[in-house]
Amino acid sequence: MSQVSGNKLDSSFWLSLFFVGVIAVWVVTAVRFDWDTRLFPWAVGIPALALALRQLVTDWRGSDTHVERGEEARYREVLDIPVDRSIPPQVMMRHTVKTASWIAAFACGIWFLGFLISIPLFVFFYLIYEAQARRFAGLMIAGLTFLFVWGVFEMMMHLAWPEAALLTLLGY
Amino acid sequence: MFDAVVIATGEIFTLSRMAWLFGGVLLGSVIGFVPGIGGRATIAILLPFIVKMDPASALVLIVGIHAIGNTADTIPAILFGIPGSTSATATVMDGYPMAKKGEAERALGASFVSSGIGGLIGAFTVLATIPMIRPLVLTFGNPEFFMTAILAIVMIALLTGGAPVKGLTAGCVGLLIGMIGDAPQTGVQRWTFDQLYLSDGIPLIPIALGVFAIPELIDMTVGERGKKIARDGPLASISTKWRGVKDVAKHWWLLVRSSFLGSWIGILPGIGSGSAIWLAYGHAVQTSKDKENFGKGDIRGVIAPEAANNASDAGDWCLTLAFGIPGSATMSLVLAAMLLLGLPPGPKMLTERLDLTLIIVWSLVLANLMATGLCFVFTRQLAGITKLPVHYLFPVLIVLIFLAAFQSTADWGDLVTLLGFSLIGICMKRFGWPRPPLIVGIVLQRLAETYFFLTTKLYGFSWLTRPIVIILFALTVWTIVHAVMRHSRDKARA
């Protein structure tokens, strides 16, 4: 995905394409519903499809304001918390992938080991490898996090934790 | 009415009731700040104990817990960009950028004071309008509710006017996502792919956390180790909570307008604070001459939604009591508590049991003051969190986000939703698509579709001639035309 201003297949194009796809699927599959059920999906979906297609064409032609006025304009014109533009896009992308991998690993840990085991493990390993904290500090923070979660969610709220795949495999 | 006011005043200002109220505020503060959980969990935990209490004390305790939840949900929104509840999503927009600039204390100070004053204005507005609530609610029929929802989505989608097509598309995608689950009018399952999890629709908390919190947390950790959230300036010397208070005083008129907007939205059934905050935020942007700082740390972007949030609370309570219509998940628990206490909600709560309703309104006033005071005292300590290294905070915050998402329905689907919408949120942020319209679309979908269906069935095309509809329609058209003209003007200048 190019971040270069003026490139025809600019990064926003792919997101526009994704939205066009989602909306198109919604509009087309709504046909199988009865009139009352599909009325609102069509009332919203058909204009939305037109808007998304227009945005797709704009991104394809590269004629939107952000291309004409520079990449910065794209972020100025949209009301949202801005991206830190002082960091090069490649660095940002690499970092995003790395942090997202930690999050994905935590999610896999929850699936395999369950919440109560994976929480202290995730906190500990992240602190040791990513924050390069001392082992004692890592153990303390992981332990305190576990105690908080166990106290509030297990003891007070009796949250129904999902079954961990490992425990299911072991027959528990 | 006057007799009921005297009785209620006498009942609330007793040592035991004040102790219950303060106890509720304290209890709510223990876990009230945990994102996605708030006062709801505390009320749920206490339900079995509440049954044994006298009704007035039980309701006073619940009000205390609820009030601190509404004030404290701002804390993670401002400090980490994690909305503590859907009512705090708008505060993220400017509160978090302020924290990044080292102005967390100022933002928190302004937020707590706005919440407190907004709550007071809301409570007194409801108190003054109790005799008129029924006719006031009835002036709004199905077409007016539908047009209000459409206006809210359009207003948020086109806030800056710089990217109207992207904003409107995001709003429509939000509406379409909100349609997953059973259709409100026919009960037909739409786009559920035979998944039980999707049959009631996707819960909002994992979506809000995925779209807003995860992208901000990822961005937070970019950079060198030892980096802090407040990276652009020293914390205490530049700004203090008192500067936030001064900001509120400076923008008092915005505070009052947002509070009345919140009170009005709170009285309307089914709309709730999730919409009130965005309408107030949109109003703050639209009525400001200098809009360019919104989204980058403008204090007005904190004051307006926070005032509207707490102001809508009193109306929400009155609707729950008088009509049995809960405006939020927490209010559903309040409804359950009332039934357990032998207090069936209904119009009698505004006539025969008016004293009890007024005790609640009084409790709201006092609880808002207590909650504001309690949070305000600890503002500096809370703001100090932004001086901790982000790499130490990150794993703990991720754990809290996962837990907050999971407790929505306690299903694996919550985590899948969180991860899926995190990806969408990251892409939207990186590629310059506005995220607020997506959330507002999802929040308002059910309301918009229900009233759209009722409107077309009951009124045909005649609803378009109703005076309030014409006004709301004109406002919607004006918002679109204004945004498109501004966009064209900007392009011409470029």
Image (cartoon, coloured by chain):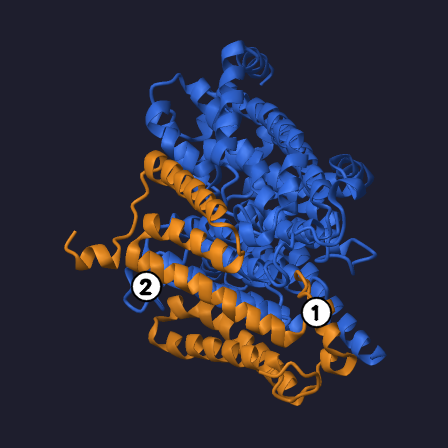
Q: Which mark is in front, 1 or 2?
A: 1
Classify 10 Å Cα crowding around label 2: few (below 14), some (14-19), many (20 and above): some
Residue A30: where, in percent of width, then height? 39, 74
Residue B477 lies in what quarter of the image? bottom right
Residue A5 in percent (x, y) is at 70, 83
Question: Looking at numbered disc 2 in the image, what kind of residue is underneath it?
Answer: Val
- Residue B494 seen from this side: yes
In the rendered picture of this protein, how many numbered marks are placed on residues?
A: 2
Mark 1–mark 2 Cα distance, whole angstroms, equals 40 Å
Residue B320 in picture, x, y percent from top left:
47, 35
Chain of the residue on which disc 1 is drawn: A
- Please state which of residues B148 and A16 is positioned toward the viewer in this rendering: A16
Rendered image: mark on residue B35? none
**Which quadrant, please, contains the N terminus of chain B?**
top right
The residue that appears at 61% across and 63% down in the rendered structure is: B222
Tell me the tag on residue B188.
2
Determine whether B183 is above or below B162 in the image. Answer: above
Q: Colour of chain A?
A: orange
Q: Which chain is blue?
A: B
- Read off the chain for label 2: B
SS of the residue under disc 2:
loop
